[in-house]
Amino acid sequence: MLTKLPFRRSTTGDQHRAHDALDWAWLTDKAVGVLVFVGGISAIIFILSVFTFITRQGIGFITDTMEVGEFLTSPAWRPTSDENPTYGAFALIVGTASVTGLAVLLAVPFSLGAAIFIAEFAKGRVRETLKILIEFLAAIPSVVWGFIGLSIMNPLIIELFDVPVGLNLLNAGIILGLMSAPIMTSIAEDALKAVPDSYREAAEAMGATRWQITWKVVLPAGRKGLLAAILLGVGRGFGETMAVLMASGHSINIPDSPFDSVRALTASIAAELGETAVGSDHYQALFTLGILLFIVTFVINLTADLVVNGIKKR
Amino acid sequence: MVALSRQAAPTPTGAPAAENKLEVRDLTITYGKTPALSNVNLEVRANEIFGIIGPANSGKTSFLRVLNRMDTFTTGMKFSGTVYYEGKNLRSWRNLYALRRKIGVVFPLPVGLPLSVYDNVAMAPRLYGTQKKSELDELVERHLRRAALWDEVKDRLHALGSLLSGGQQQRLTIARALSQEPDLLLLDEFSIAVDPVTTMKIEDVLKELRQEMTIVLVTNLTQQARRLADRTAFFLSGQWVEVGDTEALFTGNVKDERTRSYLEGRFG
């Protein structure tokens, strides 16, 4: 009985071969596979090339001239001094950190509020209009923001706070906050939208108010996405150059009030690189600042990424 | 005497009678321009299990959504006609949140909020203001027991609710609905993702709950309606066909031939 299996194959060899021919669908699939592989791998190649490039430009300075202690802790950035050039990046690091910190402090409440409003409270047209406006805000070039800092915020700060100079930490922080808010809003809104509607419905059927749903259900469920949004905003602030250069006053300072001018790492590179001799200590020192920025941005993005991927693993 | 005579007096047309938990008059539901259900007239009496049967797309779920005014958060959903809840017109309700607190809902697929078993059940009491740990502990245990789930989860109250099996999750959502101390419980095809044994367990729970509350049970299992419902309504493609005593309907005492065909399994 068992020898006569009804599903035994009865095709001849020829039929089998025809069936197994490589057709267009198969070829297309292979070709697309190769193409997207190249696309994917190119991102890795680019990032490695960039890192190699800035490292090679800056490595001479790191190994020969730089003293790590001085570089990280001294506020004296005097690369153009004839007798005794010093390369203390501490003031620049503090400048960048304080501007970014202030920006995040200002941007987080606004962007979370905006994201919650768009995702949870606004309806129909209002929501769509706001989304478009926010994308539009995110697309404003940074030099325009710098211009606003220079020509609007500057006199405004002088007038309001009665200080001699309006190009300072406060100005740069506000401008940078305004710049990163749309990005944070947009990503935070995506994070809130990713929370299933069934959660909202279940809570609403329980008699929870909109705010209770947001606070007790949606925000906890979307908290990782929100954290990632904030971190990406921080990364944006850290790397911003032009607006900070224009609004911060660009003077080397350890600020002890928001009305002190500061200088950022990025702005220093942008302002000084064009005036240095290629290969000089100063030139290499600027690339070392670049390496520092690269590492910090990389760490921020990596953290954001790990945070987001944490969602999927759960 | 006064009270008696008032009760005995015939109610004017459209005005709700006291023993009815819900009165639905000329209810028509539309989504944008698409009608979902038209011209429903029925009553749900206090402390009965009211079954709603009908094939897919007949407007059963839309009907439930009007009862706790969930139409307000469904884009494009509109209804006309009047629904009285305990004699009060649902449209004139100002605080819909307070209304929904008295109405528990169980959805077709269990919606475990991303919280622990304990927090799922404690959520409604917390929303309504109970914060004391000892009170919450007691409430959580009571409602899990009422939903016939306590024995299975008492050792893992602080595990995520979503880690429970499908049937357990559905009983968790029932416990959560009960934690609202509802007067009215709406069940929307609760057994769709639940095995037969659990279904029977939940059905037993529902029979118990009838003592304390009114239940509206939407089901696509006609036999489930027969087992549970005191009275049953038959909806078909957005039409309300008829309402009757469940046993009468199932024993062929129908007003409409379509009901007979559906109950005998000839379509749907």
Image: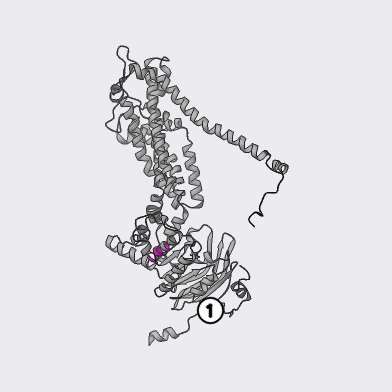
Instruction: Name the one closer to the observer, A122 or A7.
Output: A7
Q: Residue B3: percent from the left, percent from the top?
A: 39, 84
- Residue B205 image-quadrant placement: bottom left
Q: Amino acid at mark 1?
A: Glu
Residue A36 percent location from the top left of the image: 56, 35
Q: Is residue A103 above or below residue B252?
A: above
User: Label 1: chain?
Assistant: B
> In this rendering, would B31 be left or right of A87?
right
Determine the image quadrant of residue A79. top left
**Quarter of the picture holding the C terminus of chain B:** bottom right
Extreme-top residue of the structure: A83
Q: Is residue A182 above or below residue A280?
A: below
Query: Disc 1 marks which residue?
Result: B247
The x, y position of residue A245, in whole percent, is 39, 27
- Side of B235 where B88 appears, left or right: left
Q: Nearer the viewer, residue A227 or B121?
A: B121
Residue at x 28%, y 60% (from the top left corner): B133
Tell me where residue B183 sits by quadrant.
Answer: bottom left
SS of the residue under disc 1: helix
B103 vs A89: above or below: below
Which segment did they paint magenta?
B173-179
Question: How busy is the neighbourhood of tag 1: few (under 14 within 10 Å), some, or many (20 plus)?
Answer: some
Residue at horizontal 45 percent and vertical 65 percent from the top: B198
Q: Residue B176 in magenta?
A: yes
Q: Is residue A50 above or below residue B148?
A: above
Q: How is the image coloured?
A: one colour
